Amino acid sequence: MPPSPLSPRPLSHVLRALVEVAFIIFLFYSNLLMGEFNRTNGPGKRFSVAMVDIFTIKNFAIAIIAASIGYVIFEHLRKQL
């Protein structure tokens, strides 16, 4: 029996949350990467060195926490509007 168009799929809310959190994390890391190249734009600076500089456990923890808070805030605002 096909699902009715009015009822959402069981995992759709979870998948939507994961996609939105992943997008916020992507924006966080792209911002870090741009900042890394603007701050230290020396002649020997390579992409691989910048990647090693920004992908740390601390940055990942900050990204997860910030993305989770951002998701909760935007979901709250989305439901109010």
Image (spheres, rainbow, N blue to C red):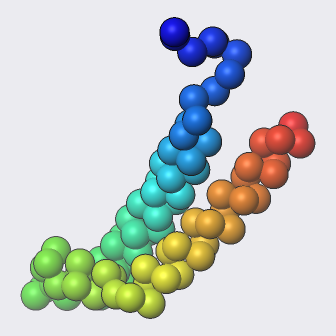
Which residue is at 72% across, 59% downward? 72
Q: Quadrant of the C terminus?
A: top right
Q: Is residue 64 left or right of residue 69?
A: left
Q: From the top left corner, tell me how far across and down residue 61 is, in percent.
A: 49, 83
Is residue 51 in sight in this rendering?
yes
Q: Is residue 74 left or right of residue 30?
A: right
Q: Nearer the viewer, residue 12 or 81?
A: 12
Which residue is at 23% across, 78% downward? 51
Q: Nearer the viewer, residue 8 or 19?
A: 8
Q: Nearer the viewer, residue 51 or 46?
A: 51
Q: Is residue 40 left or right of residue 77?
A: left
Instruction: Classify 51 as above or below 20.
Output: below
Which residue is at 34% across, 87% downward? 56
Instruction: Classify 54 as above or below 63.
Output: below
Q: Nearer the viewer, residue 80 or 6?
A: 6
Q: From the top left corner, tell me how far across and down residue 5 is, in percent.
A: 63, 12
Instruction: Classify 77 as above or below 11.
Output: below
Q: Which residue is most to the right?
A: 80
- Total of numbered circles in the picture? 0
Q: From the top left corner, tell me how far across and down residue 23 is, in percent.
A: 47, 53
Examine the image and state in which quarter residue 66 appears: bottom right
Q: Which residue is most to the front?
A: 1
Which residue is at 52% across, 73% downward? 64
Is residue 16 in sight in this rendering?
no
